[in-house]
């Protein structure tokens, strides 16, 4: 957690009391976390612990029920050009009629803006990104003809083409071969060397210590976060993997059951913990904007947390 | 029976025809509503639509081969065409990597186009009129009768009734199998009930039903009878048996209402049946007691109002305790009008009374507030002990959760706590008030 | 009489252009998995047409505008119902489709019975399509709309590509996914509406699905797929309207759709790579290659004990080692002999027999044993080497790409880093089981720079 003194360099990602619900059921409770810039951070936890949800909440793909997210001290929307994203490989249809190069070029679309097509400069950049992941020879291949590991590398190349300061990656090592894993790790280390921040959902406990400077242990709630050698301990792992907190499951179920009855509204995907979270808002006029900042978010940062608390990455 | 027949015979021919029309439509509605419910539950609404189009060539070929308007050859041809369509679409999806919707679209439009062209080519030889196939001819089919038990019964009523009984028997015999293979095909297969076989049996029955319904409402609108009643019923209930019965009732209302309205406005029966079915669905979507939109909105308001009430009560409780001035301030967030309304309501419910200079809790009010404050502080304790949240992050989260916590759940939380008599801020956790 | 009458030419031009536009926009609809929403859209236009007729009479533009309004309303209703009720999208499509169409049907029957002019011709033509009635003004209308649709697709090509491939990524990058979806839906609606007079409500959805689905068999890029689908659509439209011109009693819609189906069928069967004949051929070849590799391995293993001497291998023994049927094994022996990997040999028993009883030996027909040639030995050793490396890798390495089973030589070298391969070879060499005496690992293609150290 940043100290009062270093207000000038806000953390790369800051989550404040973030609660996220999927299909009305809270899957992450009150996550409070700050990721300093320039680190390679692994998000670790069992299946269904909400690791991917955490990343999606940062990206605004899943709306926060309560709490807020800051990226480099601002809202995600105003910083999105500085954020790169590697989704899970299964999230798209790999039979789609595009080539590997086409997919990588999509990483440059954000910068291009409306209606402008990628030109020679973007192509060069995309080919460079492909080369960095060792896929330059496959640029023209249709993506269905790539193996799983190669597809994953194409996704990574797309993120490289985004040329971001912060990278969020959802299981980039899931189901890939050894060559790909090595290639990806090397690229990630390169990025870190260049001072980029990496937030990587990871499932393989064997490799955690080799890959990450810091880890975030999640299972429905934040178990621990901090430098790997301090936080990646037996006790913390037991707390993360040693069974779910049944109370949280039951609480989620109570909320869901209740919320099931309520109307689904809003432009966001319907989800109700948002209203559970801010019941006051229900009776306020529909047009009234929610408070821009929770009232105690403005409080001096040091006051928010006792020293030595291990939720933050000191 | 005879008495009924006499009464019926005494009616004017026009009324008789209308009554038969209604009965035919209801028979068609029975079978399609039954099977359609399964289609809705299995998320196969579009397959139903596709089958209803795809049976056309089978029907025509059956008709051409038998050379008569006998129902059975047509049913057989249609069932074959329907199954072939289902199989081909599935095959395209699996082996030619065509996306599911696209595969269905390619196959059923091709089948339908083929059927229409066959009808046009052989229009001179057959008295299958394209219009009749597309839109049905309820009015005319009521006139084509045979004499049974001294009564002129329309042929199509007999055939539709037979199909309805067949479908009913199918559902009754395969009740368990249909249920489990609709709910969890993988489980069904491991239990020795082939989900694939059940699927094709269902598709075959749908095809037969669709053909039988053709005469009544035509190929395009049979889908209204298949899908709309099932979907409407699904808005009312979660139980399969109730859903089937409701669907059939919805189908009957649509059939009867549609026919009568069609007579009244002198327009197409098939069209009016779907319009009535659509109106029933709209009504259900808006006003169904549990899943209707209006009910949800009302519940939303009720929930919001409950939160205001609870916040008012809890604030007073904390003031009585005299420890939580900061909380009390933070809680005064609802709009004054809402709070005023809540106080009036709470007073009527004898949970609040007027006291010198303000409001005070009654016994009942205090009990409710106590439960609430208890939930709040237990949850704070839980968040602090288990989630290790810092002190100043507890209140907001607990203030949210307190409205969801039942006494039973609060007790479970309490069991998990190390420190049970006070919350992390050191405030007393009150006991569960005795009812 | 000219080949094309004036009116026929008009109709031909209209259906061709229409086919092109629907092919192009259909590609996006199909890839966005909205193929069957087009069906609901088309059916939902009928009440609009009838209402417009009641309000404005038989004006082509007005009818189409009415169609557009209720068509979009229908699609919007599908989206709303899917969101605000528990009923799933497939059922909602069915509901909107049938209820809107039913309402339209009731209206059109009403018009038919209560209208003085021969109105039903105007409306019923929309249901199954009636190209014959088109006049020049209609054609200009259709052409303008079709060109406009294609232009918008061209303008937002990049955005649509991203939307269809990875909507989540698009959202993360700040593209307005919902609005883009709406634009796509609007384009689909316009295409459907201008297609109604020619193809008809019931079958319009085929124009959106069939040409793109057929085109997908031939090409692997989005732009080529759009061009080809457009061409298929144009071809379909032209062929259909010509056919129905010269066979006047057939409705245009079904004929057009059947032309499309024929194109689809041809694509399905004969397209290179994705067509089913090509797939079957590829599968056969792959099986054969695999069988040959396996057989070579068996030959190597049978010869291994006597190496570097190339031993004579009794055929009966080889057949015993082969896991498949004897006939396949015989075919493989024949294949290997043709390829020059095997030469005729004599088994020891036969040789002994010849020595002791020459006459009996001569009576036994043909050869009963084979021997690897020098070239065959090299091949066989390579196959065994790859197999053993892979087996060893599977045993020693924890995680592998799930997509790869039983790789061949090229595959294994593109899968495994050179360092890993070298280590595996080292292991095998130490265990004395590396075939081919440690042939050098070939140059690696397609490997990350970092790995090729």
Image: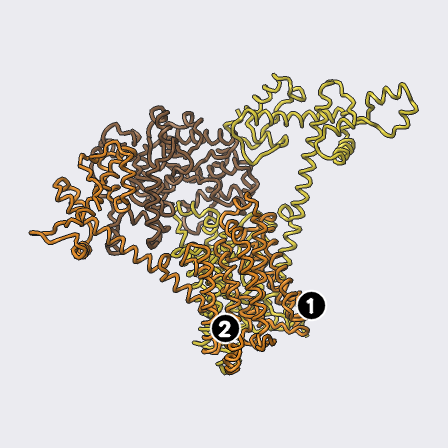
Disc 2 is placed on an element classified as helix
The residue at the far left in this view is B356
To which chain does the residue with label 2 belong?
A: B
- Write down the chain letter for disc 1: B
Q: Colour of chain B?
A: orange
- Measured as percent of width and height from the top left, residue C78 is found at 44, 59
Same subunit: marks 1 and 2: yes
Residue A236's image quarter? top left
Q: In the rendered image of this protein, which colour is used for chain A?
A: brown
- Residue B22, labelled with which disc? 2
Residue located 26% across and 39% down the image: B379
Numbered circle sitting on residue B66: 1
Residue C256 shows up from this direction: no
Earlier in the chain: of badge 1 and badge 2, it is 2
Does dot 1 land on a helix, a strand or a loop? helix
User: How far from the left and from the top, in percent, is residue A34?
Assistant: 30, 34
**Camera-nearest residue between A185 and B426:** B426
Find chain C in the image and tell me its colour.
yellow
State the residue at coordinates (31%, 45%): A65
Tell which tag, 1 or 2, sits nearer the viewer. 2
Colouring used for the render? by chain
């Amino acid at each position: 957690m940043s100290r009062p003194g270093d207000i000038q360099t806000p953390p790369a990602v800051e989550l404040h009391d973030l609660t996220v619900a999927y299909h009305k059921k809270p899957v992450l409770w009150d996550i409070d976390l700050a990721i300093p810039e320039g680190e390679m951070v692994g998000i670790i936890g069992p299946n269904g612990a909400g690791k991917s949800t955490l990343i999606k909440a940062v990206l605004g793909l899943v709306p926060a029920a309560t709490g807020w997210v800051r990226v480099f001290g601002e809202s995600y929307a105003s910083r999105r050009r500085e954020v790169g994203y590697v989704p899970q490989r299964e999230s798209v249809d790999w039979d789609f009629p595009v080539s590997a190069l086409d997919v990588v070029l999509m990483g440059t679309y954000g910068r291009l803006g409306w209606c402008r097509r990628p030109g020679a400069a973007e192509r060069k950049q995309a080919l460079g990104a492909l080369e960095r992941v060792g896929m330059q020879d496959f640029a023209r291949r249709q993506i269905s003809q790539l193996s799983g590991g190669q597809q994953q590398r194409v996704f990574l190349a797309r993120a490289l083409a985004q040329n971001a300061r912060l990278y969020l990656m959802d299981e980039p090592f899931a189901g890939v071969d050894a060559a790909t894993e090595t290639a990806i790790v090397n690229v990630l280390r390169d990025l870190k060397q260049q001072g980029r921040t990496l937030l990587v959902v990871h499932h393989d406990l064997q490799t955690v210590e080799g890959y990450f400077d810091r880890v975030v242990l999640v299972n429905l709630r934040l178990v621990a976060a901090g430098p790997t050698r301090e936080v990646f301990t037996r006790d913390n792992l037991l707390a993360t993997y040693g069974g779910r907190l049944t109370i949280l499951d039951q609480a989620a179920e109570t909320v869901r059951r209740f919320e099931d009855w309520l109307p689904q509204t809003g432009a966001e995907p319907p989800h109700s913990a948002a209203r559970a979270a801010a019941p006051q808002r229900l009776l306020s006029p529909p047009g009234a904007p929610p408070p821009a900042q929770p009232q105690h978010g403005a409080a001096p940062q040091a006051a928010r947390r006792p020293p030595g608390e291990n939720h933050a990455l000191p | 029976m005879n008495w009924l027949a006499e009464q019926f015979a005494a009616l004017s021919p026009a009324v008789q025809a209308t009554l038969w029309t209604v009965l035919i439509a209801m028979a068609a509605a029975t079978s399609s509503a039954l099977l359609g419910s399964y289609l809705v539950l299995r998320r196969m609404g579009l397959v139903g639509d596709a089958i209803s189009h795809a049976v056309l060539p089978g029907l025509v070929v059956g008709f051409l081969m038998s050379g008569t308007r006998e129902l059975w050859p047509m049913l057989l041809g249609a069932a074959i065409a329907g199954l072939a369509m289902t199989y081909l679409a599935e095959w395209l999806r699996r082996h030619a990597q065509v996306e599911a919707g696209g595969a269905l679209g390619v196959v059923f439009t091709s089948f339908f186009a083929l059927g229409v062209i066959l009808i046009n080519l052989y229009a001179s030889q057959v008295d299958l009129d394209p219009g009749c196939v597309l839109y049905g001819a309820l009015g005319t089919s009521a006139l084509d009768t045979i004499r049974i038990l001294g009564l002129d019964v329309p042929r199509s009523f007999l055939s539709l009734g037979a199909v309805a009984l067949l479908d009913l028997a199918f559902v009754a015999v395969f009740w368990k199998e249909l249920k489990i293979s609709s709910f969890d095909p993988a489980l069904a297969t491991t239990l020795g009930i082939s989900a694939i076989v059940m699927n094709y049996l269902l598709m075959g029955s749908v095809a037969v039903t669709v053909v039988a319904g053709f005469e009544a409402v035509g190929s395009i609108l049979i889908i209204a009878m298949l899908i709309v009643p099932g979907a409407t019923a699904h808005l009312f209930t979660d139980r399969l048996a109730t859903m089937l019965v409701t669907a059939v009732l919805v189908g009957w209302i649509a059939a009867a209402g549609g026919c009568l309205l069609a007579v009244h406005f002198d327009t197409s029966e098939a069209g009016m049946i779907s319009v009535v079915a659509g109106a029933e669905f709209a009504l259900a979507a808006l006003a169904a007691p549990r899943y209707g939109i209006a009910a949800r909105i009302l519940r939303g308001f009720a929930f919001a109002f409950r939160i205001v009430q609870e916040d008012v009560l809890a604030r007073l409780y904390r003031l009585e305790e005299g420890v939580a001035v900061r909380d009390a301030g933070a809680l005064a967030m609802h709009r004054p009008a809402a709070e005023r309304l809540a106080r009036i309501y709470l007073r009527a419910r004898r949970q609040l009374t007027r006291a010198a200079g303000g409001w005070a809790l009654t016994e009942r009010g205090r009990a409710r507030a106590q439960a609430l404050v208890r939930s709040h502080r237990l949850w704070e304790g839980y968040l602090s002990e288990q989630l290790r949240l810092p002190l100043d992050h507890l209140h907001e989260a607990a203030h949210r959760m307190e409205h969801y916590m039942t006494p039973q759940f609060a007790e479970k939380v309490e069991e998990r706590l190390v420190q049970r008599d006070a919350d992390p801020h050191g405030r007393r956790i009150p006991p569960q008030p005795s009812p | 009489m000219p080949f094309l009458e004036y009116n026929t030419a008009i109709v031909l031009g209209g259906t061709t252009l229409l086919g092109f536009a629907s092919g192009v926009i259909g590609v996006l609809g199909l890839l966005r998995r909205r193929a069957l929403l087009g069906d609901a859209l088309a059916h939902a236009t009928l009440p609009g047409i009838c209402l417009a007729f009641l309000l404005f009479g038989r004006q082509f533009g007005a009818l189409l505008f009415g169609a557009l309004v209720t068509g979009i309303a229908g699609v919007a209703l599908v989206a709303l119902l899917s969101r605000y009720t528990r009923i799933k999208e497939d059922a909602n499509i069915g509901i909107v489709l049938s209820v809107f169409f039913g309402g339209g049907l009731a209206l059109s029957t009403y018009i038919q019975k209560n209208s003085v002019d021969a109105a039903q011709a105007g409306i019923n033509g929309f249901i199954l399509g009636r190209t014959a009635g088109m006049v020049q003004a209609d054609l200009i209308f259709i052409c303008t709309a079709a060109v406009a649709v294609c232009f918008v697709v061209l303008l937002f090509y990049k955005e649509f590509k991203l939307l269809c491939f990875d909507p989540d990524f698009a959202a993360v990058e700040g593209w307005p996914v919902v609005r883009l979806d709406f634009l796509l839906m609007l384009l689909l609606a316009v295409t459907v509406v201008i297609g109604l007079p020619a193809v008809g409500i019931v079958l319009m959805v085929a124009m959106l699905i069939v040409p793109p689905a057929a085109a997908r068999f031939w090409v692997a890029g989005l732009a080529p797929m759009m061009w080809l689908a457009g061409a298929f659509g144009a071809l379909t439209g032209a062929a259909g309207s010509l056919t129905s011109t010269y066979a006047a009693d057939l409705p245009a819609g079904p004929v057009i759709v059947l032309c499309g189906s024929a194109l689809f069928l041809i694509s399905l069967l004969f397209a290179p790579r994705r067509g089913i004949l090509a797939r079957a051929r590829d599968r056969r070849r792959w099986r054969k290659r695999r069988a040959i590799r396996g057989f070579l391995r068996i030959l190597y293993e049978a010869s291994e004990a006597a190496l570097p001497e190339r031993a004579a291998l009794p055929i009966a023994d080889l057949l015993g080692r082969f896991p498949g049927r004897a006939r396949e094994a015989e075919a493989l022996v024949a294949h290997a002999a043709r390829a020059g990997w095997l030469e005729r040999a004599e088994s020891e028993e036969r040789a002994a027999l010849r020595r002791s009883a020459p006459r009996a030996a001569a009576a036994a027909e043909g050869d009963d044993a084979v021997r690897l040639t020098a070239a065959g030995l090299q091949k066989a050793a390579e196959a065994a080497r790859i197999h053993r490396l892979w087996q060893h890798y599977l045993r020693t390495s924890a995680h592998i790409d799930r997509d790869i089973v039983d790789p061949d030589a090229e595959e294994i070298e593109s899968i495994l880093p050179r360092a890993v391969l070298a280590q595996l070879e080292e292991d095998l060499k130490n265990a004395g089981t590396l075939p081919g005496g440690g042939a050098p690992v070939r140059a690696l293609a397609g490997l990350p720079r970092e790995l090729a150290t």
